[in-house]
Amino acid sequence: QVQLVESGGGLVQTGGSLRLSCAASGFTFVDYAVGWFRQVPGKERDFVAAIKGDGLQKLYSASVKDRSAVSRDNAKDMVYLQIDNLKTLDTAVYYCAAGSRWSKPAIPTEYDYWGQGVQVTVSS
């Protein structure tokens, strides 16, 4: 059974940092790219960052590019997203997703599996 489980969310003050984790199971993890997306109520799911299966290629959205880092540990089937200097605009539900392609990693429909999401709230 395929599972993606996010953790590490919560309430953080502006300027703080957060490290989200995504635990994968039920598929050959190293063969899959993993993307992070976020969504606020009433809006579309937005791309945040992605990392290829071998970890050698990464992609970031312009909104987090200079203050975030995505990484993975294929030995543990884990992916991490670190975001620093958090802003209130970062408040959202964050999702990790796994996909077997790397053609358009910023597009949600490129992904086969999704986690349930974790809430991140940034307060001023």
Image: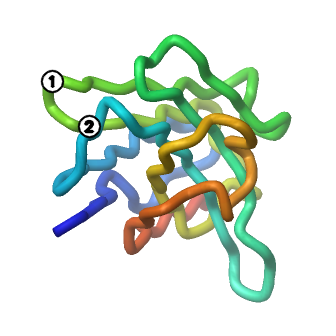
Where does label 1 land, which residue? 75
Instruction: Return the residue found at the far bottom.
Output: 42
* Residue 15 seen from this side: no
Q: For the residue marked with disc 2, what is the amino acid? A: Met
Query: Which quadrant: the N terminus?
Result: bottom left
The residue tagged with tag 2: helix, strand or loop? strand
Question: Which residue shows up at 63% across the image and 42% down it?
Answer: 86
Q: Position of residue 77 (x, y in %)?
A: 21, 37
96 lies left or right of 46: left
Question: Which residue shows up at 38% across the image and 66% down it?
Answer: 115
* Residue 100 seen from this side: yes
- Classify mark 1: residues with Cα within 10 Å, few (<14), some (14-19) or many (20+): few
Quarter of image, res 28: top left
Q: How many marks?
A: 2
Question: Which residue shows up at 17% across the image and 56% down it?
Answer: 26
107 lies left or right of 120: right
Q: Position of residue 108 (x, y in %)?
A: 67, 61
Viewer-closest of 100 and 86: 100
Q: For the residue marked with disc 1, what is the amino acid? A: Ala
Where does label 2 land, which residue? 78
What distance separates the C-alpha of mark 2 from that of mark 1? Answer: 8 Å
Viewer-closest of 98 and 65: 98
Viewer-closest of 34 and 48: 34
Q: Position of residue 45 (x, y in %)?
A: 71, 68
Query: Which quadrant: the C terminus?
Result: bottom right
- Judge whether 4 appears above or below 68 on screen: below
- Classify mark 2: residues with Cα within 10 Å, few (<14), some (14-19) or many (20+): some
